[in-house]
């Protein structure tokens, strides 16, 4: 799948739907400024699925929230967030409201809380349609809701139900149907499968993959589970302590990680067909650094098995190791 | 990977999908209403029984208490007991009580010598007027204040509103009432100090209504302020809880205006706890107004009960208790039904 996508990209010169340019997000707290995202560059093109991987607290959900300027008021954002070429950071409120959901939508994690408990799911799916297409007939909204529910494999009769009457997988599918309501070109899925069991995870991922293919949208999937991303993405971006530490084609990153952090992350999930890994999933000792007092040099150095003295001196730049593969580690490519 | 659509055949029997907000009283609401009504009836029945025995097990013989030593002879005592049926066995008295209750007969007041039901009906209107207006005003103003404070938390309005609410909340209502009398009645002379009517004004003429309005202004203001603080604080804190919820972020992400996010999503959910508190407060319509009715000498149920306690006017008390507890049960039922309408989760 990864190879196919790359071919499509090059032949058509596909349009860039999301372009993050040296994006930094800093939270102002009582303990002082806390940088959550530090100089991230990232693009998502039409028809492409980009995965963002990393542990909790690495800044990946903050990254997702900036796409529609949903970050809390305490966050300072610098750099550029271009959605279909328009900068979300400096956009006027009216433009932003028009862009939200119609230009790009978000599949939130944990759909139980992301859905309003006292509104029927049909009403919630229909709401953005009514907002963005004022004057639309009720009958057409109803038809669209049915169609959207069918698209994610749910019976249209579910529209009358309330979130608490649905299972976790059904709710997540409702969330996906809702994200498709205004036919956005870009979909951001923030941990779409985290709260689900494995069978349902596969179902939800299947729905997402099928939609990207059928609707020719661009998608950014955020997950801590590298194996999930490897199977459904074209490209993977690995984040650590607010920075991109590795980027490259999905399977290459998962199977043959360049950055030691990626290697640890991918070793944390047992691989199909590898009995040794299955019985000994490798963990990674320690926690990500406290964002208020990051160590000098490479942020991963304190936990890195390959760290040397030079790692603790300067923060390594993201550099192209081989065509299409980038890593921020001075030890990669050493003889 | 294909999506197994067959995994979702469970509810194909459900008729056409409904969209929009038209399905609020949807599945299960009728059963919910039935359950809650039966529960209320059971409470009412229990309360009727309790109300009878409560006044029978109270220490002291009614005749002695009521007679306060006025009965010199045994004949007098027996005559009294016979008049009120107190010489009959308890179970017999109970049946009579039930029978009378079914006919709306609550006995005769010892003090006024008129049927208790008539006394209560006369006073109930006044109390309902007083508490009804206050509740409506307090609900509208309080909920509005709470919403405005929470949505712009820490703003100027919030600081004044919350500070004011806390002050009012900690203020006893009789003191507030007395202050109003001291300033606006005795001081400025704008409003009468108490009562419901002026002498010589026909209560059913336009001038009479204006007269009642002038009499009710201060007590209504007192009760409104007392309730309002409560409602404003509850609405504020429940809305603050909702603001942090993820579905509010979803609503923003959909491109809704700030006001739409607030009114359609956050407030709708924040109203749930507030509804309960308001409806339960309404249940204390009789008891809640006792202080204010006493301070302003408003001839309502509360004043009737306090006066009956001094005599003690047995059957008036029993009737007032009955009405007071029935009001609480009814308000509780109303709260439940309203809650079921607002929150689909409690229906199932």
Image: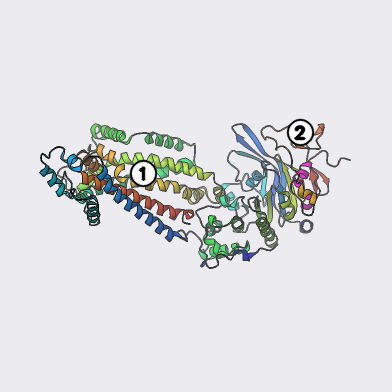
Question: Is there any visible trace of residue A91 in the rendered image?
Answer: yes
Q: Disc 2 versus disc 1: distance between alpha carbons?
A: 61 Å
Q: Residue at x 62, y 48 (%)?
A: A68
| Colouring method of the image | rainbow
Question: Is there any visible trace of residue B126 in the rendered image?
Answer: no
Above/below status of A144 relative to A323: below
Q: Which mark is residue A297?
A: 2
Q: Is residue A256 magenta?
A: yes
Q: Chain of mark 1?
A: B
Label 1: state its secondary structure: helix
Could you tell me how many numbered marks the image carries?
2
Q: Left of B150 or right of it: where is B278? A: left
Q: Which mark is residue B138?
A: 1
The image quadrant of residue A159 is: bottom right
The crowding category of the residue bearing disc 2, from other C-alpha atoms within 10 Å (few below 14, some 14 to 19, many at least 20), is: some
Main SS of the magenta segment?
A: helix
Q: Chain of mark 2?
A: A
Q: Is residue A137 magenta?
A: no
On the image, the x and y values in percent for residue B148 come to 45, 42
On the image, the x and y values in percent for residue B332 come to 37, 50
On the image, the x and y values in percent for residue B49 come to 29, 50
Q: Which segment did they paint magenta?
A: A250-267
Q: Quadrant of the image for the N terminus of chain A?
A: bottom right
Q: Which mark is residue B252?
A: none
Q: Nearer the viewer, residue B174 or A310?
A: B174
């Amino acid at each position: 799948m990864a190879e196919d996508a790359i071919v499509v990209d090059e032949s058509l010169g596909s349009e860039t739907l999301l372009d993050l340019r040296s994006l930094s997000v800093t939270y102002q707290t009582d303990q002082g400024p806390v940088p959550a995202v530090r100089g991230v560059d990232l693009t998502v093109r039409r028809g492409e699925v980009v995965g963002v991987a990393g542990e909790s607290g690495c800044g990946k959900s903050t990254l997702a929230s900036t796409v529609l300027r949903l970050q809390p008021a305490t966050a300072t954002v610098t750099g550029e967030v271009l959605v279909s070429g328009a900068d979300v950071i400096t956009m006027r409120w009216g433009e932003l409201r028009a862009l939200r959901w119609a230009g790009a939508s978000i599949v939130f994690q944990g759909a139980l809380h992301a859905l309003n408990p006292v509104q029927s799911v049909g009403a919630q799916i229909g709401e953005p349609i009514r907002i963005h297409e004022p004057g639309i007939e009720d009958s057409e909204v109803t038809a669209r809701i049915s169609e959207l529910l069918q698209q994610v494999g749910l019976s249209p009769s579910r529209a009358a139900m309330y979130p608490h009457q649905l299972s976790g997988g059904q709710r997540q599918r409702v969330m996906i149907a809702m994200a498709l309501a205004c036919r956005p070109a870009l979909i951001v899925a923030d941990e779409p499968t985290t709260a689900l069991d494995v069978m349902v995870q596969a179902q939800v991922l299947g729905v997402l993959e099928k939609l990207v293919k059928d609707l020719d949208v661009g998608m950014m999937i955020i997950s801590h589970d590298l194996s999930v991303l490897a199977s459904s993405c074209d490209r993977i971006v690995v984040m650590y302590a607010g920075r991109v530490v590795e980027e490259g084609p999905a399977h290459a990153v998962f199977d043959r990680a360049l950055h030691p952090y990626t290697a640890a992350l991918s070793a944390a999930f047992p691989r199909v067909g590898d009995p040794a890994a299955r019985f000994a999933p490798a963990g990674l000792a320690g926690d990500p650094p406290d964002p208020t007092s990051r160590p000098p040099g490479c942020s991963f150095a304190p936990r890195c098995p390959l760290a040397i003295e030079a790692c603790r001196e300067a923060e390594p730049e993201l550099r192209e190791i081989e065509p299409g593969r980038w890593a921020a580690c001075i030890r990669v490519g050493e003889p | 990977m294909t999506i197994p659509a067959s995994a979702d055949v469970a509810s194909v029997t459900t008729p056409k999908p409904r969209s929009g907000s038209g399905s609020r009283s949807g599945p299960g609401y009728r059963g919910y209403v039935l359950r809650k009504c039966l529960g209320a009836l059971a409470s009412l029945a229990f309360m009727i029984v309790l109300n009878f025995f409560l006044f029978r097990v109270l220490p002291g013989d009614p005749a002695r208490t009521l007679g306060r030593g006025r009965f010199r002879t045994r004949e007098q005592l027996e005559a009294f007991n016979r008049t009120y049926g107190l010489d009959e066995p308890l179970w017999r008295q109970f049946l009579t009580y039930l029978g009378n209750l079914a006919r709306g007969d609550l006995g005769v007041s010892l003090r006024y010598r008129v049927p208790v039901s008539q006394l209560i009906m006369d006073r109930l209107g006044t109390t309902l007027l007083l508490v009804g207006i206050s509740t409506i005003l307090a609900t509208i103003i309080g909920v509005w204040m709470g919403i405005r404070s929470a949505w712009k938390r820490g703003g100027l309005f919030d600081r004044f509103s919350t500070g004011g609410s806390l002050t009012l909340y900690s203020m006893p209502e009789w003191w507030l009432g007395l202050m109003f009398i001291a300033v606006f009645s005795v001081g400025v002379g704008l409003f009468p100090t108490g009562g419901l009517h002026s002498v010589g004004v026909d209560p059913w003429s336009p001038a009479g209504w204006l007269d009642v309005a002038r009499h009710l202004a201060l007590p209504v203001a007192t009760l409104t302020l007392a309730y309002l603080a409560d409602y404003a604080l509850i609405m504020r804190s429940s809305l603050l809880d909702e603001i942090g919820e993820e579905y509010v972020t979803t609503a923003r992400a959909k491109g809704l205006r700030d006001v739409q996010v607030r009114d359609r999503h956050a407030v709708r959910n924040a109203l749930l706890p507030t509804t309960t508190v308001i409806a339960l407060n309404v249940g204390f319509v009789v008891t809640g107004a006792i202080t204010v009715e006493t301070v302003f000498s408003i001839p309502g149920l509360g004043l009737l009960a306090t006066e009956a306690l001094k005599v003690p006017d047995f059957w008036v008390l029993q009737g007032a208790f009955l009405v007071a507890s029935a009001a609480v049960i009814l308000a509780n039922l109303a709260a439940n039904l309203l809650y079921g309408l607002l929150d689909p989760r409690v229906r199932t």
